[in-house]
Image (cartoon, rainbow, N blue to C red):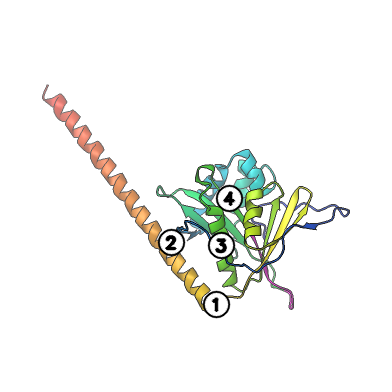
Amino acid sequence: MSVPDHTNTALPENEARTPTAAATPLAPKTAPNWTWVPIRSLAPRHRERIAAHLTALQAGDRYLRFGYPATDAQISKYVDMLDFEHDEVFGIFNRRLELIAMAHLAHPVAAPTLGRPTMSEFGVSVLPHARNRRFGKRLFEHAVLHARNRGVETLFIHALSENRAMLRIARHAGAIVERAGSESEAWLKLPPDTLASHVGELFGHQAAELDYRFKLHARQVSTLLDVVAEVKTSLAKAAHVAGE
């Protein structure tokens, strides 16, 4: 499996794993003040924006995201190695079309062994100014839906134990979380896909694309108005000088 957001560190043989949450297959939760968030699938043409998003993370956030204090060069290499044909990368854009949150769903590299469940790995990051809006949770839910519809049976998360926000999302979804010192792993058993799950994903995809086009159009109109205003100002100054 390709690795979305961390470096795997071998665990000491004498360090036992301690389960910290019971398994529940995605029991429905009630989220107050729910609002729809457009989540868009990213493609190779978005590499530059992905790199800008990740390099905007501070040192501490990079440590939580990758499992080590990634440098700009290491982030650039990670972005260059993203396999959009095999894995899935999702993002949330603001009105200025800045990528403020993104997730990487890495699928197994090799074909699943007969009798063994398929498993995909999830990693996420949200810029500081866009936090406390449940974007990480929404990206996780989006990844769950996407994985279910592709026959994935288990979602896996590897995170530093101090990454409480990520582990809280996993626990809230019903994942089994095991801690081994400074690192934790979570496994979430996914329910099978349904007609409703496929319709939900299709609707979400189309709505997100439409939302992005609206934002793009609004930005183009805003840019055009700025240019017109600048031209008017220049003409007014020129007329004033000519009249002197």
Residue furthest to the left in view is 243
How far across and down, in percent of the image, does residue 30 sit?
54, 62
Looking at the image, residue 39 sits to the left or right of residue 123; the answer is left
How far across and down, in percent of the image, does residue 163 sit?
67, 48
Q: Quadrant of residue 234?
A: top left
Q: Compare residues 188 and 96 and report the one nearer the observer.
A: 188
Residue under numbered circle 3: 141
Q: What SS does tag 1 mark?
A: loop
Instruction: Work out which quarter of the rendered image holds the N terminus and state it.
Output: bottom right
Counting the numbered discs, the total is 4
Compute the Cα span from label 4 to label 3: 14 Å
How far across and down, in percent of the image, does residue 239 sit?
14, 29
The answer to whether the residues at label 4 and label 3 have Cβ atoms under 8 Å apart is no
Judge whether residue 84 can be spotted in this image. Answer: no
Check residue 62 for magenta coloring. Answer: no
Q: Main secondary structure of the magenta part?
A: loop
Q: Compare residues 119 and 199 and report the one nearer the observer.
A: 199
Residue under numbered circle 1: 194
Which of the numbered marks, if any, corresponds to residue 125? 4
Residue range of the region highlighted in magenta in the rendering = 113-122
Residue at position x 40%, y 57% in the image:
212
Nearer the observer: mark 2 or 1; the answer is 1
Residue at position x 64%, y 65% in the image:
107
Looking at the image, residue 160 sits to the left or right of residue 144; the answer is right
